Image: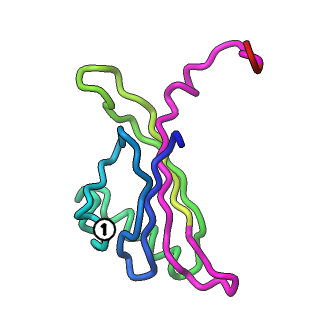
Amino acid sequence: MPGEITVIDANDEVVGWNKHGRRLFHRPLEAMGMNFRQCHPEHSLPMVERLVGEMKAGSRDKASFWIDLEVEKGEPKHKIFIEFYALRGEDGKYLGCMEFTQDVQAIRDLRGQKRLMD
């Protein structure tokens, strides 16, 4: 899967993430069970707390944003697309939140077209 997924539960604890060899935002095993506040940089924490609060309150189900991030030391920055999704039960009750992060620079760089099997 070309994206990173992290899931928090209704108690704001990290309950899982997908693993692959190279993550943009590293998740050490020690992060399992941690409050998400311990996993975000200080400068972005107030915005993430607000977002999660709005999801818990039911006033928001999704948020999308993008940043420029240096993926390889000394290389040009890549455009990183980040989405948060509220996870809800059939009754609409907030169960948690999923963060999906993807390096979309290769998509942004596409030119022309490439057909299946070309």
Question: Tag count in the figure?
Answer: 1
Q: Is residue 44 above or below residue 75?
A: below
The residue that appears at 77% across and 17% down in the rendered structure is 115
User: x%, y% of residue 47?
Assistant: 38, 63
Q: Nearer the viewer, residue 62 or 38?
A: 38
Which quadrant does the N terminus fall into? top right
State yes or no: residue 87 in magenta.
yes
The residue that appears at 29% across and 26% down in the rendered structure is 72
Q: Nearer the viewer, residue 109 or 24?
A: 24
Mark 1, Cα crowd under 10 Å, few <14 / some 14-19 / many 20+, is some
User: x%, y% of residue 46?
Assistant: 32, 66
**Way the structure is coloured:** rainbow
User: x%, y% of residue 33?
Assistant: 30, 73
Disc 1: which residue: 32
State yes or no: residue 118 in magenta.
no
Q: Secondary structure at mark 1?
A: loop
Q: Amino acid at mark 1?
A: Met
Task: Name the quadrant containing residue 108.
Answer: top right
User: x%, y% of residue 44?
Assistant: 31, 57
Q: Is residue 67 above or below residue 100?
A: above
Which quadrant does the C terminus fall into? top right
Q: Is residue 111 above or below residue 82?
A: above
The residue that appears at 57% across and 72% down in the rendered structure is 87
The answer to whether residue 117 is left or right of residue 61 is right
The answer to whether residue 46 is left or right of residue 92 is left
Q: Which residues are magenta?
A: 86-115
The residue that appears at 72% across and 15% down in the rendered structure is 113
